[in-house]
Amino acid sequence: MSYHSWKDIYKTKSSIDLYRICKGYGYPTYPQKKLALEVLKERSFDFESAEDLLTEYSRNRKLKKEKIRETYPIAMFLYQNIGWIVALLCLILFSILQYEIYLMPSDALNGELAGAFMFLRMGLIGGIMMGVLIQILRRFLPKRR
């Protein structure tokens, strides 16, 4: 189906979506808000009961999210805890690599491998800090709509 104008696109949208555009959800431009209001007036939309529809819409969205959470618990766990998982993987990886260096003879550590040994220590600390930072940022940054 091809559309030739924004008005055609907006005519196919539901009334609650158009009302959300009018209210500014999703950061629409002024002409988009004006066009959405026009289409709603053509449909003789009841603006008095619109807030009730909007709360019902948000309630339905929350129920859908809960259903997804119940349906795919492993995926939701991974999505919510990706920072901790990155930190744990870095801890395991760099710990294994450090253990390999500890097994080397001590005279090899003083020569060429001293830089590699320092990289592993900094990589371990950096990996854990990166994972913790990911979790903190995901928790406190605003979510997209």
Image (cartoon, grey):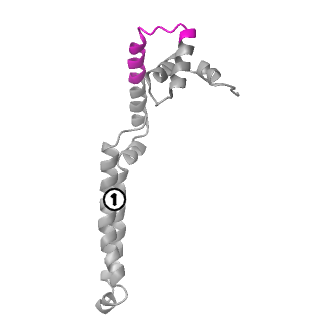
Q: Position of residue 133 (x, y in %)?
A: 31, 54
Where's residue 81, x and y in %? 35, 49
* Residue 100 shown in magenta: no
Dot 1 alpha-carbon crowd within 10 angstroms: few under 14, some 14 to 19, many 20 or more: some
Tell me how many marks there are: 1
The quadrant where residue 24 appears? top left
Query: Residue at 30% across / 61% down in the picture?
Result: 128
Q: Main secondary structure of the magenta part?
A: helix
Residue located at (31% from left, 68% from top): 124
Above/below status of 96 relative to 13? below
66 or 21: nearer the eye? 21
Q: Position of residue 126 (x, y in %)?
A: 32, 65
The span shown in magenta is 41-59
Amino acid under disc 1: Met
**Displayed quadrant of residue 57:** top left
Instruction: From the image, tell me which residue sits under label 1.
Output: 130
Q: Quadrant of the C terminus?
A: top left
Q: Which type of secondary structure does the marked residue at label 1 adopt? A: helix
What's the residue at 33%, 57% (across, down)?
131
